[in-house]
């Protein structure tokens, strides 16, 4: 299964730009298509489509979500085992790892550039120890 | 039949470097059910596709990069990738195994393996992403070391995520002891496959795919992984590094030993990495010293103390985890001099460039570690070849006339660095030595072959078979001889296979050390089980150190069933291990190798026995052990050749 672009596509190329797998094809202002053999179902195309022209694998029309409300990963460093699965599974290569805990030489994941994250949630889905939760950044407790 | 939810990708990529043609080939599910992926898939491909008598450095050789079946499924310790081909070092089955992050990158390109045939006229590298697979010009990269090459290629990717495997100057120069590097210094080092890559003018692979890897029962895999991780995170405080030597000495003195639980070794690995064994192994007799001619008595505590594991931890700035590894035995270390940092040297490197050549200078070892990683030369074979040269010089087989005027003395860091630098550039004496001890002895003559220690052409690793005869067996009988990761008596203790597999030997609480040297069919049965299980692990892409935790804590069979949806019993998986081992052996036989010829040299067997040190008086009866091992695999007891019926049955699976 893969995502699918409907005839209501306006050819804005938002989906083509955001797709990490280069699965979207098409010329500007013309109907775009998704190569089903390449699509990894990350959903980024649907979240940026202004024309409600993207159907997900279940046939549901994806809703546009403003970027500030895209879900981002939160890392529980107490649970994280530094295995690197999340770094590898991120199709956008948005995650990195560094030293974060005093006295601990194991490196832990973090998101250096929030804009690079598409909010696909693959990192949380693949983490064997459930050390990652996805939520909009607005869900973060505000600093006093 | 769909392969989408079975852990494996169900396809391979075939690249013809002579024509530039790249094709995707679908692999039948029956092949995976019979050989798994990884090493098993590779054995299937090489057996069918490399013609008898193929020149390992010619276009007929097939060079494969394969990922494991469990890689990317959510299982732990399963991020190993393997390089396979006909070895120019042994003229038979060649394999090298590596961690880092390259293994999932292969599967993210939608395939389980990438196989190269032919040879390019000019340097090229393979670039693959989700929509592109092409050979690109690598003329500008030719001559760069492995770290420079990887840095350059990753920079070219820009924001795109990618992984690189490449050769350094040694592979380009077709040094027969060269390997393939990833993650700026992790090495698929053995079997000389870097030379095969160099002979094909293939500088690198750049993999930037994003394909997802699907399993049959992902939640079950994750559940098993959480249990495994709990054992890994169990890390009680342990003694300081200087006390590891007395522990080793105690193990030497005791006439009996407890059957080892790998949880203890895991604690050492997590704290220090493999360097935890630097001094302990010397004291207990596991470390070969001075080209296998010395002993723990020649490299006692005061000589080995510069390799105290705490020395390495003090230089370590951060731990290095391979993909899907919760343990993190690797590390990044600061160095002084020409290079600013290096991957933490492994035990094999520290010993082969340390006690094996009587070198106490750790600065020299850190420098050589990085130099060899960058050049892409196998540190085990390089240290071996240096030791061989030092002994040749000591015995007058070579003189300063042969060495460009340099005096070769045991333990002289300057002489050791000189030899390795020359081997990398193939300059002068380096050109003679750059292809390992067997070739060097042939070139030098004058009786040098008597001190050229190898198994079937490959230099054995830094584990003394007089201490653990299982190493002698596996160095000798494995289709890729001389490799230490394929089996040992100690490994079997830690795998604890008898807790899940019916019919394999059970280990009690402990045993007398002398029992290891007594003729007993149990030793061959243990050897067979080791080989079977290691082939399963290599098919799965599993790490040896994960396996050491024991089959109940690192549940390879259960992970495989959860990933594939199969319901194979542990015994069926062990049979798959037999299939893989038999096909690799059949490959060697077809290439004209005589299995008896890879028997290790007498020094490794205590012939004559050592007169001092931890292995004093010990002799290993390898000849009968090899025959017992072959017979248990139902190969010919006298020749080690599998029956044609058995080979035909396996070869017909397609």
Image (spheres, coloured by chain):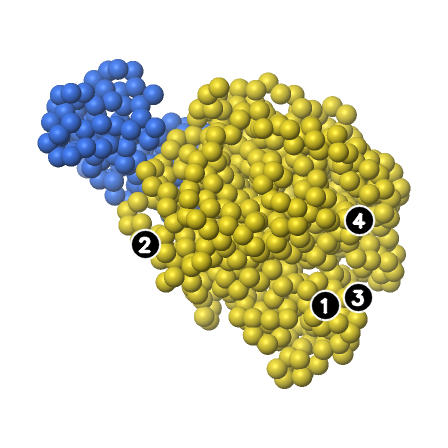
Element marked by disc 1: helix
> Pointer 4: what residue?
B596
Element marked by disc 2: helix
- The yellow-tinted chain is B
Q: Residue at x 57, y 35 (%)?
A: B41
> Pointer 2: what residue?
B155
Per the model, the C-alpha gap separating discs 2 and 1 is 43 Å
> Pointer 1: what residue?
B441
**Residue B295 image-quadrant placement:** bottom right
Residue B272 visible at all: no
Give the quarter of the figure containing the C terminus of chain B.
Answer: top right
Residue B54, given in percent of the width and then of the height, sits at 62, 50
On screen, B614 above or below B421?
Answer: above
Q: Of residues B184 and A127, which is closer to you in this image?
A: B184
- The blue-tinted chain is A
On screen, B582 above or below B254?
Answer: above
**Does residue B207 appear to the left or right of B622 in the view shown?**
left
Residue B265, given in percent of the width and then of the height, sits at 64, 43
């Amino acid at each position: 299964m893969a995502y699918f672009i409907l005839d209501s596509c306006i050819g804005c190329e938002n989906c083509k730009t955001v797709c990490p797998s280069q699965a979207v094809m098409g010329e500007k202002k013309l109907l775009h298509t998704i190569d089903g053999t390449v699509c990894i179902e990350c959903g980024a195309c649907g979240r940026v489509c202004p024309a409600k022209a993207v159907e997900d694998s279940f046939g549901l029309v994806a809703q546009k979500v403003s970027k500030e409300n895209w879900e981002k990963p939160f890392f529980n460093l107490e649970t994280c085992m530094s295995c690197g699965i999340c770094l590898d599974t991120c199709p956008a290569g948005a995650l990195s790892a560094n030293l974060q805990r005093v006295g601990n030489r194991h490196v832990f994941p973090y998101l250096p550039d929030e804009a690079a994250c598409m909010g696909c949630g693959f990192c949380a889905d693949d983490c064997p120890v459930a050390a990652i939760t996805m939520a909009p950044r607005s869900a973060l407790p505000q600093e006093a | 039949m769909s392969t989408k939810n079975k852990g494996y990708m169900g396809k391979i990529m075939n690249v013809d470097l002579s024509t530039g043609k790249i094709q995707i080939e679908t692999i039948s599910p029956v092949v995976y059910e019979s050989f798994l992926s990884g090493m098993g898939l590779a054995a299937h491909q090489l057996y069918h596709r490399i013609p008898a008598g193929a020149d390992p450095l010619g276009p007929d050789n097939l060079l494969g990069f394969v990922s494991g079946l469990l890689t990317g499924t959510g299982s732990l310790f399963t991020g190993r990738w393997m390089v396979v081909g006909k070895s120019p070092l042994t003229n038979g089955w060649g394999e090298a195994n590596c961690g880092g992050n390259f293994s999932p990158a292969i599967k993210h390109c939608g395939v389980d393996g990438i196989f190269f045939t032919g040879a390019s006229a000019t340097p090229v590298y393979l670039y693959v992403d989700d929509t592109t697979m092409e050979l690109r010009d690598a003329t500008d990269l030719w001559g760069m070391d492995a770290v420079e090459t990887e840095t350059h290629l990753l920079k070219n990717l820009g924001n795109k995520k990618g992984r690189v495997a490449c050769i350094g100057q040694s592979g380009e120069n077709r040094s027969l002891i060269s390997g393939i590097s990833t993650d700026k210094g992790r090495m698929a080092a053995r079997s000389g496959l870097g030379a095969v890559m160099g002979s094909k003018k293939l500088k690198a692979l750049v993999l930037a795919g994003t394909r997802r890897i699907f399993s049959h029962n992902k939640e079950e895999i994750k559940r098993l992984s959480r249990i495994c991780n709990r054992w890994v995170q169990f890390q009680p405080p342990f003694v300081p590094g200087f006390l590891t030597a007395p522990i080793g000495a105690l193990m030497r003195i005791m006439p009996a030993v407890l059957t080892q639980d790998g949880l203890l070794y895991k604690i050492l690995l997590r704290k220090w990495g493999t360097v935890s064994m630097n001094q302990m192994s010397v004291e207990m007799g596991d470390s070969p010293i001075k080209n296998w001619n010395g002993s723990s008595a020649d490299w006692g505590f005061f000589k080995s103390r510069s390799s105290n594991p705490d020395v390495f931890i003090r230089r370590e700035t951060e731990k290095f985890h391979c993909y899907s590894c919760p343990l993190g035995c690797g590390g990044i270390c600061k160095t002084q001099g020409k290079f600013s940092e290096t991957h933490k040297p492994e035990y094999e490197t520290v010993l082969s460039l340390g006690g094996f050549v009587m070198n106490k200078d750790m600065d020299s070892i850190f420098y050589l570690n990085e130099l060899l990683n960058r050049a892409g030369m196998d540190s085990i074979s390089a240290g071996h070849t240096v030791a061989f040269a030092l002994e040749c010089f000591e015995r007058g087989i070579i003189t300063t006339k042969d060495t460009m005027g340099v005096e070769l003395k045991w333990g002289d860091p300057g002489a050791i660095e000189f030899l390795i630098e020359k081997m990398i550039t193939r300059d002068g004496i380096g050109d003679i030595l750059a292809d390992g001890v067997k070739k060097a002895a042939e070139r030098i003559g004058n009786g040098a072959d008597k001190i050229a220690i190898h198994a079937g052409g490959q230099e054995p690793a830094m584990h003394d078979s007089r201490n653990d005869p299982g190493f002698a067996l596996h160095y000798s009988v494995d289709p890729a001889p001389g490799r230490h990761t394929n089996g040992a008596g100690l490994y079997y203790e830690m795998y604890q296979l008898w807790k899940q597999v019916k019919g394999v030997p059970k280990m009690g609480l402990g045993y007398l050390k002398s029992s290891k040297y007594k003729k007993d069919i149990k030793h061959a049965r243990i050897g067979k089980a080791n080989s079977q299980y290691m082939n399963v692990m290599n098919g799965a892409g599993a790490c040896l150190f994960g396996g050491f935790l024991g089959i109940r804590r690192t549940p390879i069979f259960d992970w495989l069933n959860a990933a594939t949806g199969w319901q194979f019993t542990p015994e069926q998986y062990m049979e798959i291990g037999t299939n893989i081992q038999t096909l690799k052996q059949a490959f060697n036989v077809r290439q004209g190798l005589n299995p008896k010829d890879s028997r290790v040299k007498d020094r490794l067997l205590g012939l004559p026995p050592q007169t001092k040190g931890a292995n004093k008086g010990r002799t290993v009866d390898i000849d009968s052990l090899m025959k017992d091992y072959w017979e248990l695999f139902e190969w010919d007891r006298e020749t080690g050749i599998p029956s044609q019926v058995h080979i035909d049955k396996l070869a017909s699976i397609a």
